[in-house]
Image (cartoon, rainbow, N blue to C red):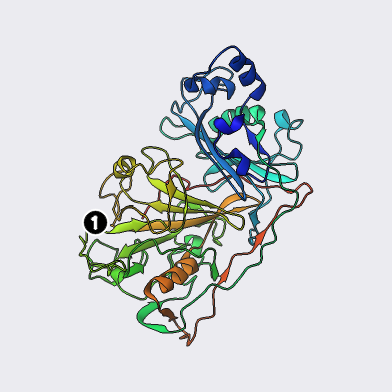
Amino acid sequence: MTSTIFTGIGRSPVPVLLPFDTAAYLNARRRGAIDPQALPRYQADFQTDLFDAGPSGYDAVFSLGPEVTSGLPSRIFARLVEVQITGSSITYDLADPAGGKGESVKALSAQYPDLRRFIREGYVRYAFTRFGVPYVVSIQCLDSAPRPKRLACREAYPIAERFLRALRVTGGQPSRSAPEITPVAAERPAVFDADFTYRPVGDIVMNSGARGQGGRADRTAYSQIRFPLDAPAYVHSQSFGRRRASDKFDQPWSQYPWRDSFCEARDFNVGQCASGLGHQGQDLRPGACPLRRDGPDGCDPRQQRVLAVRDGVVIRSAKQQGAIIQVNTGTEHIRFRYMHMNPSAMDDDGLLNGRALREGEPIGVVSNYLDHPNGTTRHLHFDVQLFTRDGWIWVNPYTTLIAAYERLIGGRGREIGLEMAASPPPAATGTISTPAQGPSLLGPAADAAAGRDRN
């Protein structure tokens, strides 16, 4: 019955927990047809914005409008609030010193004995297990005093806990056996490219790391993807170096070698960086006019296309500055986020919650939007999130991008630096684990601390 409301719910191999009162809905339906606009009354007043189920589990986004006040304390932030939930049979095994922390919530301890509440990477997260499966509920918020234009985490608590109290098993086809997944080596061209060079992963610009810390030397290719731009393209800091980046195409930031900027100083919490703060991803700039692989058609240097890196589903509400492509297969549960494209253009193009994309499909153009047009340099910020025992966590996409670019240009890059590497070692894919049948814990879905990249 719920498959008519939550399309594809039967694809989930884990029990689907949603804030949906099936019994009340059925009772109402016996009395007559139900207007789809009335569904929130059976969902603790939450509106369904996204539901996506696949071979590794499910993800959903719900929202609560500011007009809903019953059972909630008053709050300074009087706007719509989004709540995310993920349940997954796959978790990625990362070295994560900040993981596994949190506090219990006394009011929910009877319903969720192992529940942990904690704030990490810009979200308040509620992690618990049910049926041996990790589940996560999360709300993006700021760990500070309440503000009219930004939700404070303390004001998010009552909304998240209302959501948790309403969760019920709504569907799914639980699988008894967890998938066996073995990491493999990423495929790399045998022949070196004449031009493509890159500095080692973790080698960020000197003194650019927060609190005096350096980069993270993560040589893992977390997924085999299509590079998100056409070639040539360049990965460089937009904030540090001898000169700050501009939109000119003939500058050092539009040349090889590439350079990592994952752990550059920002005010975003990034647990994979030694300082605890970082950039979350990498900044990509197209060349003056890329050489397309699909024909000799010309290009407008100010209208250079951005492409889907994998087949996946879009997670993005209207007016949001970032767009996520989520991949949910039997061997992956991973997210790829794109920043700095114009939100109005994305809205007009229908790049919104639930849209299915094909790998290589154009999804926009490289732009410079950060709160407003011309808010940053013209570039694409690209990052990767994995589902771990602490939820959706940012990992360094630098090696993943190197492997993707090599496949795009058909040649291997050369790693250069203080010690020249004659032959870079092969990149490996990320290690994945499946949840134990005992009480394993997990954190919630994460996104940018402010939903945007500062450069």
Can the viewer see residue 45 in this picture? yes
What count of labels does the image hold? Answer: 1
Can the viewer see residue 279 in this picture? no
**Mark 1: which secondary structure?**
loop
10 Å crowding of disc 1: few (<14), some (14-19), many (20+): few
* Relative to 31, residue 137 above or below: below
User: Is 62 on the left or on the right of 296, as rendered?
Assistant: right
| Image location of residue 54, percent across then percent down | 58, 47
Q: Residue at x 55, y 56 (%)?
A: 276
Q: Quadrant of the N terminus?
A: top right
User: Is 357 on the left or on the right of 113, as rendered?
Assistant: left
| Image location of residue 436, percent across then percent down | 76, 52
Location of residue 352 by image quarter:
top left
Q: Residue at x 60, y 15 (%)?
A: 28
- Judging depth in this view, the residue of 280 and 223 nearest the camera is 223
| Image location of residue 322, percent across then percent down | 40, 47
- Judging depth in this view, the residue of 117 and 311 nearest the camera is 311
| Image location of residue 19, percent across then percent down | 61, 29
User: Is 307 on the left or on the right of 251, as rendered?
Assistant: right
Q: Which residue is mark 1?
A: 303
Residue extending furthest toward the bottom: 422
Amino acid found under the numbered disc labelled 1: Gln
